[in-house]
Amino acid sequence: MPAEGPTGIRFLSPLFKEPLPARLDRVTGTVRGTNISDGANTIHTVEHLLSAAAGLGLDDLDIEIQGEEPPAADGSALPFAAALRKAGLKEKPDQERRTLTLAGRLEMTKGDTAYAAYPSPGGVSFKLTYAHSHPLVGSQTVEFAMDPDEYLVRVAPARTFGFSHELEALKAAGLALGGSLDNAIVIADKEILAKGGLRFADEFARHKLLDLIGDLALAGLPLKNLRIEAVRPGHAGNVNFAKLLSEKAAPL
């Protein structure tokens, strides 16, 4: 639903005493997804919906939710992005838009995961590399200049994925209980199981980019004139990098 004021993205529910903002200080978990909480209620796996909003350039949004998690849909952000676009997007009159940018280069590295951001006049662009030892995955790199139309075509359709050997452990931990080939890609020992086949040859890297865009949206302010690069990113790293970016960036 439209948000009247400059409120950012918020989740609303009859169970909540007040709206739950999608912000970094509300993140309570990053295992297989990004979760936010008000201390009493938790919303799981918010990154796909947040990615759709950020990819379309939405700064303020009220999201009414029933249950503890947005629908898995097909495992991508496309159903959310398509619904938002269909509802119609418009600029708010007389409301100043604040953004985040950097004066210099910012880097974060942990193990084989690395992030970097630096000023890049003309917009926001990404370069992301996802690599895995599985022979059917290998190394994939995707580059993307942030644009709503391009996001809908090149990023939003990329689906979440997992490895077959992880499924038992995930379900024993109470995760991925609703997972199926209707909403995920499964990478088995000798084959990739995907409904309708892969949508892109580099769909894994594109989905990691989708997640990164959604997690960075938790910073609460749109990015401006930045180049962001990531190698082997994950939700925990995304959130920590978003925190670092928020600390070092200058709000304009």
Image (cartoon, grey):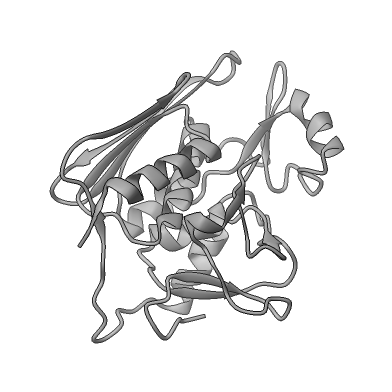
Which residue in the rendered view is the most extreme toward the right?
172
Say if 100 sits above or below 3 in the image.
Answer: above
Total marks shown come to 0
Foreground: 51 or 108? Answer: 108
Is residue 78 visible in the rendered image? The answer is: no
Q: x, y (%) of residue 86? A: 47, 74
Percent x, y for residue 57?
A: 35, 64
Image quarter of the C terminus? bottom left
Seen at 19% across and 50% down, the residue is 225
Quadrant hosting residue 132: top right
Give whichever of 121, 184 is nearer the camera.
Answer: 121
Q: Determine the residue located farthest toward the left in the rendered image.
A: 121
52 relative position to 245: left or right: right
Give how far across and how far down residue 105 sits, in percent: 21, 35
Name the side, left or right, on which 180 lies relative to 8: right
Indicate the quadrant where residue 32 lies: top right
Depth check: give the residue in front, 223 or 155. 223
The residue at the point 50 percent across, 59 percent down is: 50
**Nearer to the camera, 20 or 131:** 20
Q: Residue at x 47, y 52 (%)?
A: 214
User: From what the image shows, is residue 58 above or below residue 213?
Assistant: below
In which quarter of the view is residue 188 placed? top right
**Residue at x-position 54% and y-position 59%:** 49
Quick check: 35 left or right of 179? left
> Where's residue 94, x and y in %?
23, 86
Whether residue 215 is visible to the viewer of this picture, yes or no, is yes
Q: Does residue 15 lie above or below 163 as drawn? A: below
